[in-house]
Image (cartoon, coloured by chain):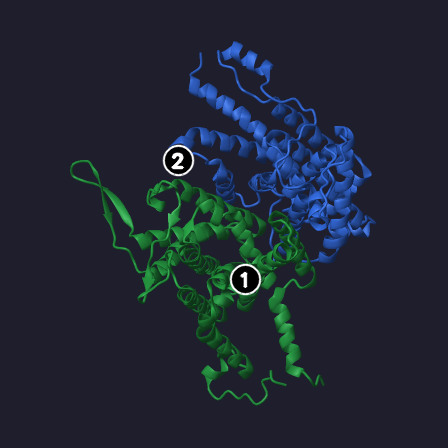
Amino acid sequence: MMPDQLLFAMEVTLNGLMAGVLYALVALGFVLIFKASGIFNYAQGVMALFAALTLVGIMDGQVPFSHLINAMFGTDIHDFGWHVPAVLAIALTMVLMVGFAWLVNRLVLRHLVNQEPIILFMATIGLAYFLEGFGDIMWGSDIKKLDVGLPQGLNAFIDDTTYGWFGYGFFIDNLDIVATVIAALLVTGLVLFSQYTKQGRALRAVADDHQAALSVGISLNFIWVLVWSVAGFVALVAGIMWGAKSGVQFSLSLIALKALPVLMLGGFTSIPGAIVGGLIIGVGEKLFEFIAGPALGGATENWFAYVLALLFLVFRPQGLFGEKIIERV
Amino acid sequence: MFYREAGDFSTTYPQDSQTFPIRFDRYRYYAVLVIAFAVVPFIINDYWLNAIFLPFLIYSIAAIGLNILVGYCGQVSLGTGGFMAVGAYSCYKFMTGVDIWLMGADGQMIQYALPPINIFFSVILAGLVTAAVGVLFGLPSLRIKGFYLAVATLAAQFFLVWLFNKWEWAYNYSASGQINAPTRGFLGVDVTGPATEAWATYLFCLMFVIGSAVLARNLTRGSVGRKWMAIRDMDIAAEIIGVNPLRAKLSAFAVSSFFVGVSGALFFSVYLGAVEVGEAFGIQKSFLVLFMIIIGGLGSIFGSFAGAAFMVLLPVLLKNTLVGTLGWPTDLAAHIEFIIVGALIVVFLILEPHGLAQLWRVAKEKLRLWPFPY
């Protein structure tokens, strides 16, 4: 029989791994855009929120901008009174995210070509603010329940099995398991896409060298719209997962901030880095809270990831899998 | 016609190197000072003070501080809120008397407390404490650059906010976890606490603003500022021509955090009076100050003021128009504010990446030739 503390720690580690997968999902969106365009897209988290809001809104048949319309014209409308099936709603949301990607490129990024990275970063912060306000006005800012039919609650099989082994059942949420499977599928899909399709190769070429890619006839505009759409898709998946876990609300956009240390740890340019970084952060912060949290007064999850990433970067400034930073004068 | 250097002769070196070499500029500066010190205090009331003047003055100091770090030294920081919290909490400790707990002879803990320090010096000391904390969190900047550094400063933001939530000593073991500014006076006039005169708090903050602006302006004009700018433009090249990156970067962090700490101290003690750290100094505050310097203009003291004024006035104007005139619900106005702020930032970056300060510069260039452009 193992000591209880060790069992708890194992359970915490497992849960940390699951949480890490969700962080990695958000971080993945960042990496995609950063690789293809060198833009650090702060709006990724808000995109996840916006996608989730839109999904819920479409599924429940809400009238977009109803709050605004009511305020302007003194009417009182809320919803169309129909329910859209989840699959169709997801497809519609995806169409909207592609439209958003196209608009961002048309209205913002095209005008900021050749600006310094920091300016582009600031522009995406502006974009994040815009999208946040826009999402709230479009769908209302109350907390919404997202239910696309994913299994939830305690996984009885794991509970039983571990109880049989250790005499103590591990609590693992079904949703986390689904999230892990989906994340694995997503990453496999992305890798296959970027290795074996024409667009995927073009995408990697752009990531490697903009000018060389242009010179062999790859359309930068198309690639950027494509990559923002893919990032929008990743955001939608992340939004569904987080939304199903803790409701669709403003705090969803804050997970973007949690994805940042994940990125730093893994390196901005590496897809495996995002996954590994996410797992390290997820496990690290859960274990640290478990071990040192009670002594420090709890809630160490708020800052542990950042401090860990900070300390790590001091020794390896490009992250785990990032490309070596070479500077020339 | 008015704004030109013709006929303005410098006969001594001090005249040649003064802050405002053009006479019109100089008189405009004096005029602004006279209005700020001798006119505004007589007409100011509580609404104008709390809605516009105090936030503007206090955010100006924070914006100047952040501008030194981001605009002049090129080290992007998202930890402003955390550093403001350091300023606020250390100011609170100095105002109420710093206490230490020591083990007595009989094993009991005995509290020794310093006497409370005058609010003026409390604010200055709070700035110094923040400068020390800033240097500590600035250390990684020697290894980490660009985005990585921006994210690394988030560690400061989240850690410091968490710390002031959990560290009971910092808020004098109060049950609510809030800090409340006791009534304190400067030169015999109350500037903190519930019963203050509008003009008194206004002048108290204005004093710090003018001091910060003059200090920052002269630092950035001098050798320190040139070193910062060299580091910003290309740190390896700067190192080769003999700028010590360690000293340049850490001094930028220290000076910047000093100003940010002063503004945090004033924000708590004079403006809000009572503070809950997560609410007042959260990540949103870091972004707010960052937006101020982007919209105002990176690397410009005037830009810090312009950006602070813009970001303070915009919500007030929007609220007055949407809620006051059109009668829309407040939450809707808040969302529209988000949209407008976000869109403005993007538009500004596209049309004028150098901010309001650049518009001002262009306007001045036009004025020099106006009305005879040839």
The quarter of the rendered structure image containing the N terminus of chain B is bottom right
Q: What residue do we see at 58% from left, 41% from top?
A: A254
Q: Nearer the viewer, residue A306 or B349?
A: B349
Q: What residue do we see at 63% from left, 47% from top?
A: A42
Q: Colour of chain A?
A: blue
The answer to whether residue B5 is visible is yes
Q: Quadrant of residue A141?
A: top right
Letter of the chain that mark 1 sits on in the rendering: B
For label 1, the SS is helix
Q: What residue do we see at 50% from left, 87% from top?
A: B10
- The answer to whether residue A45 is above or below residue B72 is above
The quarter of the rendered structure image containing the C terminus of chain B is bottom right
Residue furthest top in the image: A164
- The answer to whether residue B320 is above or below residue B30 is above
Q: Please state which amino acid type lies under the numbered disc 2.
A: Leu
Position of B126 with respect to B294 (left or right) is left
**Residue A243 location (% of width, % of height):** 63, 33
Residue furthest left in the image: B105
Q: What residue did someone put label 2 on?
A: A296
Discs 1 and 2 carry the same chain letter: no
Q: Nearer the viewer, mark 1 or mark 2?
A: 1
- Report the disc number at residue B36: none
The answer to whether residue A269 is visible is no
Query: In green, which chain?
Result: B
Calculate the distance from the C-alpha at mark 1 to the C-alpha at mark 2: 37 Å
